[in-house]
Amino acid sequence: MMRSKALKLSLAVALTLVLLYFFGRSVPWKDVPGQVVDVNVPLFILAVILSAFHFVTRAARWHILVAREKLNVRFRSLVAGNVVGFTINFLLPGRLGELAKPLYLARREGVRPGFAIGTVVVERLFDMATMCLLLGLFMACRPLFAASWPISAEAGRQLKFLGILGLLVAAGILAFVLALYLFRERAIKVVAFVLRPLPAKASAAVTKILREFIDGLKFFRTRGQVALYILLSLVVWLGIALFYWVFFLAYRIHVPYFLVVPFVFLTAVGASIPTPGMVGGFHYFSKLGMTMLMGLAAGRAAGVTLVFHAVQLAVTCLLGYAILARDGMTVLQLKRMGESESQ
């Protein structure tokens, strides 16, 4: 077990270093400090405030899924679960925050752990689908503003490739999830057969979690809820785009709001790479987006990226630690909970 953890950590660190190399190469680092301090302070403060806004919109969206298990779940618990999940993702490798988030809610609100985990899978599917949709709309509308805000042919090809790749991944995960849901009993029997060498108690526990997980995949009760969930998914990601847009304005980078959409798509791709604290992946794709889409110099793109990451890290972790302190919990406890569920 210890050897496996050491190997995973070594691979994560190696991947981080490779991505940081690509992020840092060609950057004139002596110019970066000057780029970082050249900022409009009121707009910067507004951007810092907006950096936490997605916790609220994500909580509103999450409530639709959780309400099937518990209708009167407290909204503050939904917000806190999102904050805690992102805090764990920032501090630890392996995306353990995706497990810490539902397990935190299960502990606070008495929701079944497997069910809560299933709702997070649904969320991530819609996150991928929403970003692919927004990117597709951007690419479709690009001819309308190509003259005033041109994007190189190479950038267009890369965006198209990433959009198609993301859509294929989302479709693959959705097909797997639907297969679990549609063939529930057969899937449980297959898992039970695979677990036969384990002790009966351990096998029963895993089977119970799987049943709860599949219950969490029962997406919505009405078509109206589907439409509302899609709408809130758009609100979540357009709100994230608003945060970045205000940040760009704070650094006197004047770009139209719609040009931030493909940038957000690229940063989401980078943040999904399971490196410690999202370091490396976020940095490389953020710099790539600024240089490729907005024509910024490498030094300016690198400096703004570092501030982006530092602000999100600081705001999220401060809120996360405050919530955990209020609840009498620690990051280590949540880490152990996530690891126990992932095994």
Image (spheres, grey):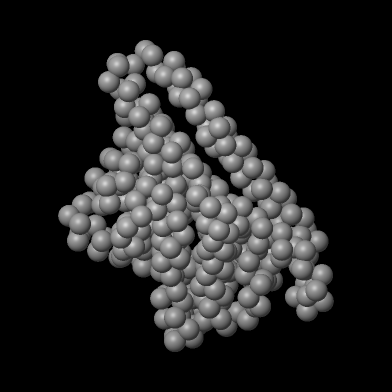
x and y, in percent, of residue 172 in the image: 62, 38
Residue 27 visible in the displayed image = no
Question: x, y (%) of residue 147?
Answer: 82, 76
Query: Extreme front residue here?
Result: 222
Q: Is residue 141 above or below residue 113?
A: below
Corner quadrant of residue 140: bottom right
Which residue sits at x=71%, y=59%? 136
Q: Quadrant of the N terminus?
A: top left
Answer left or right for 79 relative to 302. left
The structure residue drawn at horizontal position 51% and vertical position 49%, both measured from the top left corner, is 220
Which residue is at 52% across, 32% downward? 180
Is residue 103 rendered to the left or right of residue 15?
A: left
Q: Is 71 placed left or right of 255 in the picture? A: left
Note whether 223 is above or below 41 in the view shown: above
Q: Which quadrant of the view contains residue 150?
A: bottom right
Q: Residue at x 66, y 48 (%)?
A: 167
Q: What is the x, y in percent for residue 134?
A: 65, 62
Q: Quadrant of residue 338?
A: top left
- Is 83 left or right of 109, judged from the image as shown? right
Extreme-left residue of the structure = 328
